[in-house]
Amino acid sequence: MPHDTPLIATIVAGLGLAFVFGALANRFRIPPLVGYLVAGVLVGPNTPGFVADAGLANELAEIGVILLMFGVGLHFSLKDLLSVRAIAVPGAIVQIGFATLLGVGLAWMLGWSMGAGVVFGLALSVASTVVLLRALQERRLIETERGRIAVGWLIVEDLAMVLALVLLPALAGVLGGQEQADVHANGLLSLPASYGIWGVVGITLAKVAAFVVIMLVVGRRVIPWILHYVAHTGSRELFRLSVLAIALGVAFGAAKLFGVSLALGAFFAGMIMSESELSHRAAEESLPLRDAFSVLFFVSVGMLFDPFSLFSNGLPILATLAIIVIGKSLAAFVIVVAFGYPVATALMISASLAQIGEFSFILAELGVGLKLLPEQGRDLILAGAILSIVLNPLMFLVIDWMKPWLEARAARTAPPADAKPVGPATEPGQVASVASASKEDGPPPKTALAGHAILIGYGRVGSLVGAALKEAAQPFLVIEDADKTLARLKADGIETVAGNAANAEVFAAANPEGARRLILAIPNAFEAGQIVLRARAANPSINVVARAHSDAEVEHLKGLGADTVIMGEREIARGIVEEVLGHKPSATEPSAA
């Protein structure tokens, strides 16, 4: 292996082994991320054979975190974020405090100092950005109320950890560590301890506030303008480059100039870009890189793990894991229920937060550098992160099992129907949380329609198709998973099934057995293919119409059973030919598939 290509070697080894073990995990119906972690362990320094560059792997993983948070920001608006502040802010603060106390208790049992306990507890209190967002994306929950609460909670944790990273060097001497005047943590600007605790807090909060104001005032005008300017050049390559440059540039600038974390800076860049009409296209262009670099994140985490530590630190690792998976989850569940949200929302948020990740590693490294945290503490944090990430998909299976029992118990103790409702549902301008959760709290009821069309997706294409079907008085229903779109459809009197059509229960609620036609208006050909297979299994005679963006996608969907696949570029060509030549294209001219 050449010694002058560590970056290429790290990417090739990381992605190659991640693919192999991810595919094996998927074959045995295990979440692929478990395979990615195993790939990281194999290329890490704690196993024999090839060892990838850990420093480069961490930086590549950081790009994954940036792009992932940028993608989440593209689906968010400031209004969405502010709508969950009443639960996200106090909930995150209380949960961080509770988890930190549990960490301090375990540190005391292990004979560590109070400072070590504080650093250890803080590291166990903050969830991984990548793991939480991947879990929400896989379940199509990001644009739901519970998804917004989870992301808002994550943002508050992020801000709290930024503050902790700045304060720890100033407090190291008081907590029994080595006081340092200027400590740099993961690119965050640090402040001299001579400013005093309140001075450090004040300056940190002022820098964060300055960043937010600049993004809302300047970024709101500049970022959409750049996107529209580049779009008008007609170059898809330049548009893709502009999206990546904005995401990475804002994140890096936020960290270097304002002391804000890279992830938080990227989130705000995406949130500002979401106000542009081109935000949907920006999300599509950045998706492949987001997926690739998020895989490298899991590989980099696996590289840090020493599998032999499971034998040398068995009981402390189990105790650490219990704090992360059980302690944090119970705290989050109690907090969310106490705020009047339904059991399903509390369970989902509990499962989402039952893991730790990138900020935990940063805190651990800083704690060891300040002589606050013993190296054993860093090993426990790494082991807890690996095991909690592996167990996180199982947590969602557990909550699916527990949900009916807990909801039945809650129903028995619920107030009478004529009692005044409490909690977030009573706030002006908000939809009742029970109603908003109904689409995810069990199988949706089956439609009474028959001989109808099933329209999958109600975005730019689906809304035009739906309007035409409505005008023609054709019976149809829409399967959609975006809350805002569902509310608009309900207001228009259009029947809907809420959720992801690739889900068996959701699709069955649309009565595919009695449907006449299936219209796939979603741009994702892979997901559309899964739905085509499901539709053909339920009703072999159903007529399937889908959309595609390339000849390969056309062949893919037709091979799975789609009757007609319409490619946008071909339809544009047909329109141009008809306009120029004054007649419809012949068989030799561009046509729909």
Image: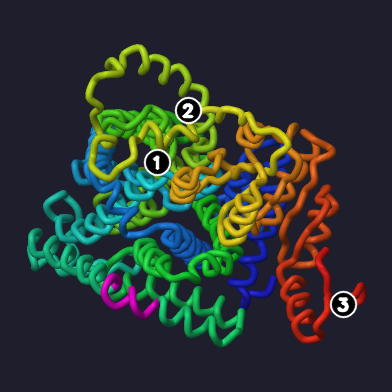
What residue does disc 3 label?
589
Q: What range is drawn magenta here?
A: 215-223
Q: Amino acid at mark 2?
A: Ile
Write down the quadrant of residue 575 in the picture.
Answer: bottom right
Q: Circle 2 sits in a helix, a strand or a loop, which is it? A: helix
Please tell me in which quadrant of the rendered image residue 73 appears. Answer: bottom left
Q: Which of marks 2 and 1 precedes in the sequence? A: 1
Q: Residue at x 27, y 59 (%)?
A: 162
Which three-letter amino acid code belongs to the residue tagged 3? Glu
What x and y, as percent, mark residue 422? 23, 29
* Amino acid under disc 1: Arg
Asked whether 174 or 493 is in front, the reply is: 493
Residue at x-position 54% and y-position 50%: 302
Q: For mark 2, what is the residue? A: 399
At x 54%, y 81%, the residue is: 231
Of the numbered discs in the image, which one, if any, rests on residue 146?
1
